[in-house]
Amino acid sequence: MDLEYRLDGPANAPVLVLSNSLGTTWTMWDAQFTDFNKYFRVLRYNTRGHGNSPLNGGKMSLASLGKDVIDLMNHLNIEKASFCGISLGGMTGMWLNRHYPTHFNRLVVANTAAKIGDTDAWLTRAKTVRTEGMQSVADGSASRWFTKDYIRARPGIVDALVDGIEQLDPLGYAACCEVLAYADLREEVAKMERPMLVIAGEHDPVTTLAEAEWIIERASDAQICLVPASHLSNIACPVMFSRQTLNYLTSGATHVIND
Ligand SMILES: O=C(O)CC1=CCC(=O)O1
């Protein structure tokens, strides 16, 4: 298993898999960490091309990113898990819901869409990053991720994330842009069986509320939750994000772990 991962939380608790967005690493879940660990054995991993998760040498796709999660679960002997992913991580979750429903209980997919953005724009971004490096995308990342008010109010958090994207491997980032260029779940959403909470950011310009509504109108068992944030809603609205996610993932469950 060459994916970078870590497990935290009580060894006997049910497993929750966390999947990061493009240009971030598993540290993006730091604000959720304490709350999620009370209820779950938390499995964080870095999406291929991010952190120390290497490119696989071949062409990556949403399917290969989804299969990475299944391989990781198999490697750790995890038969069934809950899942929470954001943006590209949310798309990975929807792909898993469609293709590996028996491996998952409930899924939370945040700030995501059945098709994110425009194919040509992703291919252009991939090319730019390959030729000019990470700085070319780092400069605009804060305004893609957060509202102006949040950037003003929490410069330390924003700067740390921008520093993080600057450290990433341009080839890894570009490969994931190419995954996004061709990832298209629009024909698949109606076939997603497992219960899914779709978290949308009220001010998200990347994956809009309308795109989240589009998903819940078609998936067989999906609910929406709106948070007053832009794209990285788990960071901008950590308390609400964690509460809504935990309420959804543990509802009807008998596996609450006490402190
Ligand atoms: O463009 C960005 O940086 C935001 C984003 C789109 C897909 C994703 O995972 O992050």
Image: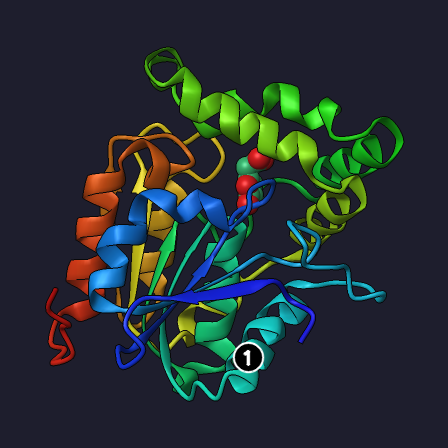
Query: In the visual, does 255 lie left or right of 101?
Result: left
Is residue 224 in view from this perspective?
no
Q: As rendered, which of 132 and 126 lies closer to the eye?
A: 132
In this rendering, the answer to whether 45 lies above or below 181 is: below
Q: Amino acid at mark 1?
A: Ile
Residue 42 on image: x %, y %: 36, 66
Is residue 254 in view from this perspective?
yes
Identify the image quadrant of residue 248. bottom left
Q: As rendered, which of 250 and 100 lies closer to the eye?
A: 250
Query: In the visual, does 207 lie left or right of 176?
Result: left
- The yes-or-no answer for disc 1 within 8 Å of ligand 1 is no
- Quadrant field for ligand 1: top right
| Quadrant in which the C terminus is drawn | bottom left
Residue 104 on image: x %, y %: 37, 79
In this rendering, the answer to whether 123 lies above or below 11 is: above
- The residue depicted at 78 percent of the width and 39 percent of the height is 170
Identify the image quadrant of residue 79. bottom left
In this rendering, the answer to whether 212 lies above or below 3 is: above
Query: In the visual, does 168 lie left or right of 106?
Result: right
The colour scheme applied to this rendered structure is rainbow
Residue 235 on image: x %, y %: 36, 36
In this rendering, the answer to whether 183 lies above or below 169 is: below
- The residue depicted at 36 percent of the width and 48 percent of the height is 212
Q: Which residue is mark 1?
A: 70
Query: In the visual, does 124 lie left or right of 230?
Result: right
Disc 1 residue crowd, few under 14, some 14–19, many 20+, Cα 10 Å: some
Residue 253 on image: x %, y %: 14, 78
Q: Residue furthest top?
A: 152
